[in-house]
Image: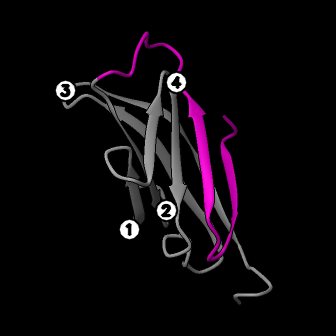
Amino acid sequence: MSNQIKVYRKNTEEITCTVNGLSSLSGYTGYLTVKDEAGGTEQFSINTGTSDGSITNLTITFKVSPANNDIVAGTYYYDIVVSDGTDNYTVSQGKYVVLESVKYS
């Protein structure tokens, strides 16, 4: 998965990643967290235990809603983590770039 995700402000976005290094994600929950800076204020978080996320085999999918993407255009930071409550694995991290949308500016 690329280390940069680009989205348009107030748009729905589907983010998919494949986990390598584990034989199964059974018993794991996936988390997508976006912060204003590394270690900074959380802008939003989604997990696969809700209707906004799912795990199929080794593929994790997050559906980012327009409400979640209703943040000021700019560069944020994300990480995707899988956890079984004991073990945590960072699958991907990088920049989450919110672009201004023409219609919803």
Label 1, label 2: how far apart the Cα atoms are: 7 Å
Quarter of the rendering containing residue 81: top left
Residue stretch in magenta? 1-26
Are the residues at dot 2 and dot 4 in contact (C-beta closer than 8 Å)? Answer: no
The secondary element bearing badge 1 is classed as loop
Q: Amino acid at mark 3?
A: Thr
Say which label, 3 or 4, has the lower sequence index.
Answer: 4
Q: Residues within 10 Å of mark 2 (few under 14, many from 20)?
A: some
Up/down of 20 relative to 44, above or below: above
| The quadrant where residue 40 appears | bottom left
Mark 1 or 3, closer to the camera: 3
Disc on res. 19: 4
Could you give the CA–CA distance between mark 3 and mark 4, rounded to whole angstroms? 18 Å
Label drawn at residue 37: 2
Quadrant in which residue 43 is drawn: bottom left
Q: Given the image, on which type of amino acid does mark 2 rest?
A: Glu
Q: Which residue is mark 1?
A: 41
Amino acid type at image mark 1: Thr
Q: Residue furthest right?
A: 102
Q: Residues within 10 Å of mark 3 (few under 14, many from 20)?
A: few
Whole-number angstrom distance, CA of label 4 to CA of label 1: 26 Å
